[in-house]
Amino acid sequence: MVAKQRYCAKAHHDTWIVGRQKGHCRVCRSENESKNSRKRYAAMTVEEKDIYLTRQRVWQEANKETHRVTSQRWKEEHREETRATGRRYYAAHREQLLAQHRIWEQNNKDFLLKRSNIRRRSGARLHKQDYQDVINYYGSDCVYCNLETTGIDHLIPLAKGGLGADFCNLAPCCPRCNSVKGTRPIWVMLGREEVRQGVATS
């Protein structure tokens, strides 16, 4: 006999919590806990917020891998919310962020000069037609996360000897995925055995 599939008030099926009242499920409970947590934090005094944030930092430091995986999963499930939060933060702190960036540039001149030299040696200047050829071949979506983008990634990083304007070394990529990949090989992003084999035999 096939068990009857149960739905909560928001149609979250297959997530029912045994013993809970009708209309509650795991998804609903998670959403309610998040809302209640935000309300409690908003009602805290400055001292209570400091204590709360300190405890959070201590836990994150002691559970780095768990925190990284959980944060990454949440960002993947709430991409639009994450982007909106980032845009709001940048708009509210634009001058502060630009000042920090200028300070970083002053403190990392050697790194910037090295990167500039690598780009020059690799012929990293990408012309408009080269960019259009890449978009025509792959489409306008990021090859890693499938979100629409106007960015370009070097599959073999310039720091590892990849050519900057070689069509075979270019692919559409959003800024976030480009930053996550950095100078690491492509299979860090894809995680597929056939990609490793393909690169190894090429």
Image (tube, helix red, strand yellow):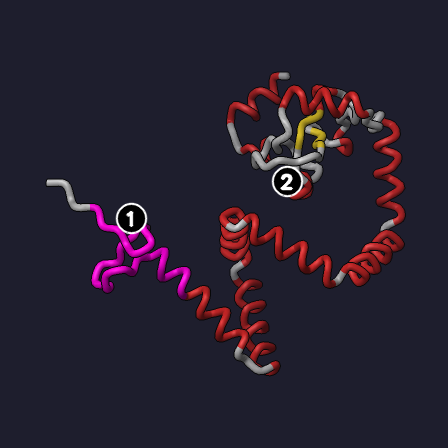
Q: Nearer the viewer, residue 139 or 164?
A: 139
Residue of label 1:
13
Q: Residue at x 70, y 32 (%)?
A: 153
Q: Position of residue 113 (x, y in %)?
A: 89, 41
Q: Position of residue 148 (x, y in %)?
A: 62, 35
> Looking at the rendering, in which quadrant would you find the N terminus?
top left
Residue 177: mark? 2
Residue 189, picture quadrant = top right
Residue 53: in magenta span: no
Q: Residue at x 44, y 70 (%)?
A: 36
20 to the left or right of 201: left
Residue 29: in magenta span: yes
Amino acid type, callout 1: His
Residue 51, picture quadrant = bottom right
Crowding near pointer 1: few (<14 within 10 Å), some, many (20+)? some
Q: Residue at x 50, y 52 (%)?
A: 74
Please provide the residue range marked out in magenta. Answer: 5-32
| Residue occupying the far left of the picture | 1
145 to the left or right of 157: left
| Residue occupying the far front of the picture | 9
Q: Nearer the viewer, residue 78 or 153?
A: 78
Q: Position of residue 12 (x, y in %)?
A: 32, 50
> Looking at the rendering, in which quadrant would you find the C terminus?
top right
Please state which of the two labelled residues, at mark 2 or mark 1, is closer to the viewer: 1
Dominant secondary structure, magenta: loop
